[in-house]
Image (tube, rainbow, N blue to C red):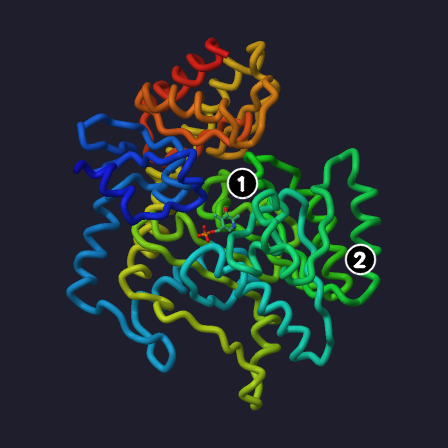
């Protein structure tokens, strides 16, 4: 039996209706921007394997450090113990995070970093003797699949079985220049109840919502309002973090910084899962007390695993190199040129870009995961390009180390598909 048949016997894949999509392609090796299947066919990883491997697959600047860490200290409990990889990671983060972020809490994935953020916000008010239970989120947001994260996510089409068990959430539309006054009014109505604990958002780019984008100044207005009512603001930068928007963090575009930030995905350069919830001194101070119960009693077994911390530290060092910073500018300019090539194509309804994130909407009506998606996906794969269209949106979020030739290959395959529609 080949790998694909063996896979079918016992494996249950994420986000998959197995009856409709029984086949999963075995990948045996990856290097730089390329994935290789069993037959040696190469695919350019146009979405950096869900925005994680931004420095290229198996980057030796990361793997060599992880390998030597592996012989030094594999793991130790992070409650009562500490270690150099975690300490150095915290110091490196302080160099690049918005200045108000002062404390770093570890967990294992984007969803848990969001759950941690929500719990921090709820307990922040609780510790101050205020009962506030509601979280406000943006429509169309995605924050993960654990209960808290799922509750604040606005993409609820597949959340039907769970909706009645969600935490208390209210949603407001994403602000645009047209609706911002109405959104602010609706926001204020909610804030006035005095029951709002937190406001969570994906800053500037809603990844799962087909890379939809909105302006920093509009988000700034909402953050100012939230802060004026003592509401804790949470920037979910799990997708946008670490250079993808053209700055280290999407929050760097904001005048008013969030109280809490959630980080994961490319944090470790795709080597291993890890997430961080960072917060300001003000949040931390509400937990710092003689009373033990005011502490934050949340913990994951693998918190701050030394190997993963080492991978994260190496990734952050790479992000700050001149080479990667130059690449970010080069990819950004390259996408702008590509935009000029295709924006007037009759099959292109609209395009958008922030940093190295580029998206185009097709001028074709369809269901989010209908047949068109499979048609596009298969076309790209046959061309040796891995892209993952969402609805009628095609987007590129390739590793920072992608070459111009590899970019051109992605662009050509997109142009190719436009001409078949
Ligand atoms: C992917 C993502 C998450 C969830 O992260 P997981 O590691 O998949 O749990 C949360 N928020 C945003 C913005 C994401 O893009």
Q: Is mark 1 within 8 Å of ligand 1?
A: yes
Residue 177 lies, in percent from the top left, at 76, 35
| In the image: residue 164, left or right of residue 332 | right
Kindly identify which residue carries mark 2. Answer: 190
Q: Are marks 2 and 1 in contact (CB under 8 Å)?
A: no
> Quick one: SS at disc 2?
helix
Kindly identify which residue carries mark 1. Answer: 208
Q: Residue at x 49, y 50 (%)?
A: 238
| In the image: residue 327, left or right of residue 337 | left
Q: Residue at x 56, y 13 (%)?
A: 347
Q: Is residue 326 visible?
A: no
Q: Nearer the viewer, residue 248 or 310?
A: 310
Residue 217 lies, in percent from the top left, at 69, 43
In the rendered view of the protein, which quadrant contains the N terminus?
A: top left
Residue 94 lies, in percent from the top left, at 45, 61
The image quarter containing residue 17 is top left
How far separated are the C-alphas under marks 2 and 1? 26 Å
């Amino acid at each position: 039996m080949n790998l694909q048949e063996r896979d079918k016997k016992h494996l249950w894949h994420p986000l998959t209706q197995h009856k409709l999509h029984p086949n999963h392609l075995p990948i045996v090796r990856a290097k730089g921007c390329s994935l290789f299947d069993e037959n040696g066919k190469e695919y350019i990883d146009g979405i950096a394997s869900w925005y994680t491997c931004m420095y290229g697959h198996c980057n030796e600047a990361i793997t060599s450090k992880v390998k030597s860490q592996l012989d030094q200290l594999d793991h130790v409990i992070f409650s009562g113990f500490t270690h150099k990889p975690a300490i150095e990671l915290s110091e490196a983060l302080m160099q690049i995070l918005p200045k108000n972020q002062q404390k770093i809490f570890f967990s294992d994935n984007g969803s848990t970093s969001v759950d941690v953020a929500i719990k921090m916000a709820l307990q922040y008010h609780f510790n101050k003797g205020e009962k506030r239970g509601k979280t406000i989120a943006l429509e169309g947001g995605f924050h993960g699949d654990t209960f808290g994260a799922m509750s604040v996510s606005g993409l609820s089409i597949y959340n039907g079985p769970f909706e009645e068990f969600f935490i208390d959430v209210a949603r407001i539309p994403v602000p645009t220049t047209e609706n911002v006054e109405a959104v602010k009014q609706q926001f204020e109505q909610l804030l006035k109840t005095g029951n709002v604990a937190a406001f969570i958002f994906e800053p500037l780019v809603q990844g799962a919502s087909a890379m939809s984008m909105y302006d920093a100044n509009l988000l700034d207005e909402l953050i100012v309002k939230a802060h004026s009512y003592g509401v804790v603001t949470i920037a979910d930068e799990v997708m946008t973090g670490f250079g993808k928007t053209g700055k280290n963090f999407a929050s760097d575009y904001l005048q008013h910084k969030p109280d809490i930030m959630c980080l994961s995905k490319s944090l470790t350069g795709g080597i291993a899962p890890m997430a961080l919830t960072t917060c300001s001194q003000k949040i931390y101070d509400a937990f710092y007390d003689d009373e033990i119960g005011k502490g934050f009693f949340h913990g994951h077994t693998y918190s701050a695993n030394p190997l993963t911390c080492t991978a994260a530290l190496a990734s952050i060092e790479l992000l700050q190199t001149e080479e990667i910073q130059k690449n970010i500018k080069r990819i950004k300019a390259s996408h702008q040129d590509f935009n000029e090539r295709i924006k007037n194509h009759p099959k292109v309804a609209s395009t958008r870009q922030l940093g190295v994130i580029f998206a185009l909407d097709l001028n074709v009506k369809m269901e989010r995961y209908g047949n068109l998606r499979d048609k596009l996906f298969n076309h790209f794969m046959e061309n040796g390009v891995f892209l993952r269209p969402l609805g009628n949106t095609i987007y590129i979020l390739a590793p920072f180390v992608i070459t111009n030739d590899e970019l051109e290959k992605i662009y050509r395959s997109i142009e190719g598909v436009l001409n078949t529609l």
